[in-house]
Image (cartoon, grey):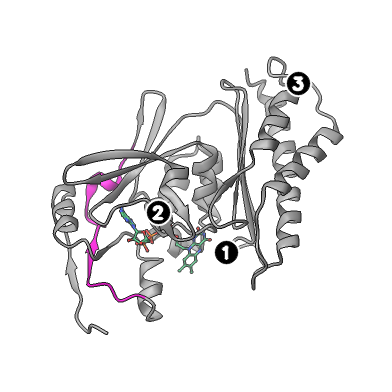
Amino acid sequence: MRSEMDVYVPRTLDEALQQKSAHPDAISLAGGTDVMVEINFGRLRPAGIIDLTRIPELREWRREDSHLFLGAGVTYSRIVRELADFVPLVQASRSVGSPQIRNRGTVGGNLGTASPAGDALPVLAAYDAEVVLQNRRGTRSLPWHTFLQGPKKTAMAPDELIRGTRWQVVNGPGSFSKIGTRNAMVIAVAGLCLQVDQDARQVRVALGSVGPTILRAPEAERFIAERLTWDDPGAPVTDEVVAEFAELVGRAAKPIDDVRGTARYRVHGCTVLAGRALRWALEERKAFKWL
Ligand SMILES: Cc1cc2nc3c(=O)[nH]c(=O)nc-3n(C[C@H](O)[C@H](O)[C@H](O)COP(=O)(O)OP(=O)(O)OC[C@H]3O[C@@H](n4cnc5c(N)ncnc54)[C@H](O)[C@@H]3O)c2cc1C
């Protein structure tokens, strides 16, 4: 095991990209809430660390016409404070760890770790977000499902950084909820984001912690899109339709048994979360008359 580790502290994005290109085996560090756990437990001993925390470009978010761009280094605490319009993202951010973790942890780090239990990831999947990657030669954008390749596996090249994530701002209600063994400081046993897209006439549902990576529930999405009266948000939706939607969401889950829960419990969890999320969205649609 190496005893020495080089630490690079770039002040600009250009400098960071140069260092990543020169030292592709050095690990990027944002909040460090995943990286430092791995190092402290002796599971990771990178050749070097590139500390990204001093790079202003990574800490920006901005509206770009009809899209939102969220820099990789925006923390969960800032999302809660500054991005109130993005309700599911705020709900997911608020559920991450403790205040200390939310003050340090970033969505870029959640993407970089690519855990199926990463709480921001079902939200990005339900937003149909893309991940913006950059190296010295330029940038490229990948759909979330191309970027996330499997448990802790991404399409990022060794000389690339995550610049941020970008999605079309959606008109419609949405929510994020998760099941765990307690209400705070918990890794999700199952997590779900539901986002209604009133303009595209879609209901998008993404699941976390119930498969090797984040999953969408396409059959359930099609089923409910065909049953909503899109021109009349107040039109009733029967309990049977909600129950069948929830059942279809449960069927989209591909969980395993592990220390946190059995596969059966996780499927049931998805069913319960889906039914609740759909009811909340229907109530909100009625109240706001989203059209
Ligand atoms: C006590 C505790 C509780 C937690 N609770 C939760 C929880 O409830 N929900 C949850 O989802 N997570 C939780 N986590 C995990 C962690 O906080 C999140 O995954 C967080 O989003 C990681 O962000 P970070 O900025 O700290 O990432 P880091 O640890 O700095 O990095 C994580 C990974 O992303 C890479 N990376 C980071 N930024 C970039 C970039 N710009 N370009 C390229 N690669 C990059 C790093 O190289 C590394 O591989 C918890 C962690 C702890 C210690």
Query: Callout 2: 10 Å neighbours few (<14), some, many (20+)?
Result: some
Kindly identify the residue that appears in the image at 56 percent across and 56 percent down: 95
Q: Which residues are magenta?
A: 44-61
Q: How many labels were placed on the picture?
A: 3
Residue 22 vs 177, above or below: the answer is below
Q: CA distance from mark 2 to mark 1?
A: 20 Å
Say if mark 3 contacts mark 1, CB within 8 Å: no
Taking the image as drawn, is residue 81 in sight?
no
Kindly identify the residue that appears in the image at 41 percent across and 51 percent down: 107
Measured from the top left, where is residue 244 in percent x and y? Answer: 80, 38
Front residue of 163 and 140:
140
Q: Is residue 157 left or right of residue 229?
A: left
Check disc 1 and report the residue beneath it: 187
Residue 57 drawn in magenta: yes
Q: Amino acid at mark 2?
A: Thr
Question: For ligand 1, which image quadrant applies?
Answer: bottom left
Query: Callout 3: 10 Å neighbours few (<14), some, many (20+)?
Result: some
Is tag 3's residue or tag 2's residue first in the polypeptide sequence?
Answer: 2
Kindly identify the residue that appears in the image at 51 percent across and 63 percent down: 97
Q: Amino acid at mark 3?
A: Gly
